[in-house]
Image (tube, grey):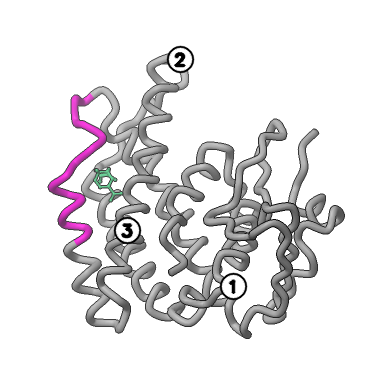
Amino acid sequence: MTLRPTSLLKRGILVRLVPPAVRVLAAGGVAAALLVGGGTAIAAPAASATSTAYVASAPRGSYAQLHPLSALSAQRLATADLVAAAKYGTGSPIDDPAREQQVLDAVARQAAEVGADPAATVRIFRDQIEANKVVQRALHRKWDADPASAPTERPDLTKVRAEINRINGELVRAIAAATPARTSPYCSAVLTATTAHVRHEQRLDALHTVALLRASRSLCG
Ligand SMILES: C=C(O[C@@H]1C=C(C(=O)O)C=C[C@H]1O)C(=O)O
């Protein structure tokens, strides 16, 4: 059985999710579940419910602040398919520590400029990078196993990185704008909702949904 967020609504797991009044019922120790094709349940990010918890009326604007973080994380993950294709069969490793350090240095600098916490921003971006590599590794495994499914064109990695840089800048600005929601005790519950909605909006497959959850680990806090 494949359950979608609407089914969760019917089951009373997610209750009335109309910004700015976001209400989330977290039942049975699980804040919510994101469900992917084939009916596999994936636990939501940082599900923080104790046994049975009811979180009502998150602060106004929480959803609007956190949705861009989920949406931009998913956009950034979409670039992983292109990076994977750019590297496939070239001998270029998926892990590029020098490039990762450039990204982290740049976002720390940008965070300081726009009033985001540089340490928190770097933590968030470490997760974005790990999530990106989750997608790349999975695709390389898939293409190795089924060469017919491998891409036939190789994107220009320099251009893809320019797009990643653009998304990085937007994400840093969104992090700065989301400080109240990120540090609110309601953050995990609201982020569960924004993650589910972005999965639906961007029609994420199972791999990108799993990666989005990995990317979201440090968004609250
Ligand atoms: C996306 C890339 O692959 C990896 C992921 C990175 C990222 O998410 O920013 C950076 C370097 C690599 O370790 C890349 O090489 O550009």
Say what amino acid the circle numbered 1 marks: Tyr
Of the 4 image quadrants, the one containing the N terminus is top right
Circle on res. 205: none
* Secondary structure at numbered mark 3: helix
For the residues labelled 2 and 3, say whether their Cβ atoms are less than 8 Å apart.
no
Identify the residue under disc 3. 125
Task: Identify residue for label 2.
Answer: 146
The residue at 26%/35% (across/down) is: 94
User: Which residue sits at x=31%, y=56%?
Assistant: 164
User: Please, which residue is most extreme toward the right here?
Assistant: 10
Cβ(mark 3) to ligand 1 < 8 Å?
yes
Query: Which residue sits at x=59%, y=51%?
Result: 44
Residue 99 inside the magenta-drawn segment = yes
Magenta segment, which residues?
A: 90-104
Closest to the observer: 86 or 64?
64
Amino acid, disc 2: Asp
Label 1 to label 2, Cα distance in Å? Answer: 43 Å
Number of other residues with Cα within 10 Å of mark 3, as a class: few under 14, some 14 to 19, many 20 or more? many
* Secondary element type, mark 2: loop
Decide whether residue 66 is among the magenta residues. no
- The amino acid type, in three-letter code, at marker 3 is Phe
Q: Which residue is mark 1?
A: 186
